[in-house]
Image (cartoon, rainbow, N blue to C red):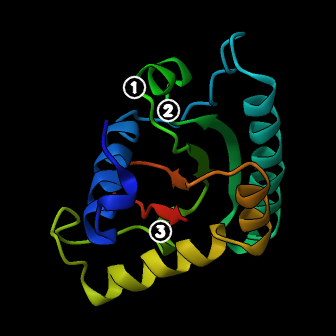
Amino acid sequence: MIDLHALKPTYLLCVILALGALAGCEEQPEAESPQPSSTSPADQAAIEDLSRVGTAVAAQSADLKLEFLGAKNGIDPAQAAASGESWSLYHLSFAAAQPSELQLSGNVHSQTLSPENQARQERWQKVVCTPELSDVMRAHQIDLVYATFGKADMPIAQCQ
């Protein structure tokens, strides 16, 4: 397993961008599937609280016309337990009717974002990484939440 705490933020962002690119390959965003029945009560409580935050983010971002699709644990709890890892990662998924205001342009896979793309990335980060999300992360001891919307050429928020 990868130790997230040992990674530099730039490398971590690259990993998350790659994960987002893989997750965004579908033509249309799909609603998150329900968590498996083996989800622990603590995990389910975290998902419920993250879902409330995601719904609030969508409601407070009327200009972006966001739709919150769901929250899920980004780590298989069984694998984490087997490996002895103690960090937690969750994913928030959004769709947007008009994502062009945040859509990345040019070489989106470059290690350095263009100034325009950096501004879009920062805006998305501010939209998602709210004080309410920080409170939920502290309450559930969540190390990292990443939030995506649309296809792979959309920014990904990395909330720590």
Are discs 3 and 1 less than 8 Å apart at CB? no
**Left or right: 71 with respect to 118?**
right
Q: Nearer the viewer, mark 3 or mark 2?
A: 2
Q: Which image quadrant is residue 10 in?
A: bottom left
Residue count near mark 3 (Cα–Cα under 10 Å), binned few <14, some 14–19, many ≥20? few
**Left or right: 149 with respect to 9?**
right
The C terminus sits in image quarter: bottom right
Q: What residue lies at 58% left-to-right and 44% top-to-bottom?
A: 90
Q: Which residue is mark 2?
A: 75
Q: Is 111 above or below relative to 37?
A: below
Residue 5, disc: none
- Mark 2 or mark 1: whose residue is earlier in sequence: 2
- Residue lying farthest to the front in this orientation: 84
Query: Could you tell me how far apart the alpha carbons at marks 3 and 2 are, in whole angstroms?
Result: 30 Å
Q: What residue lies at 67% left-to-right and 39% top-to-bottom?
A: 71
Residue 100, disc: 3
Q: Which image quadrant is residue 133 in?
A: bottom right
Which sits in the foreground, 122 or 30? 122
Q: Nearer the viewer, mark 3 or mark 1?
A: 1
Dot 2 falls on a residue whose secondary structure is loop
Instruction: Give the residue type at disc 1.
Output: Ser
Query: Could you tell me how far apart the alpha carbons at marks 3 and 1 are, in whole angstroms?
Result: 41 Å
Question: Number of numbered discs present?
Answer: 3
Instruction: Give the residue type at disc 3.
Output: Ser
Residue 83, disc: 1
- Percent position (x, y) of residue 30? 57, 31
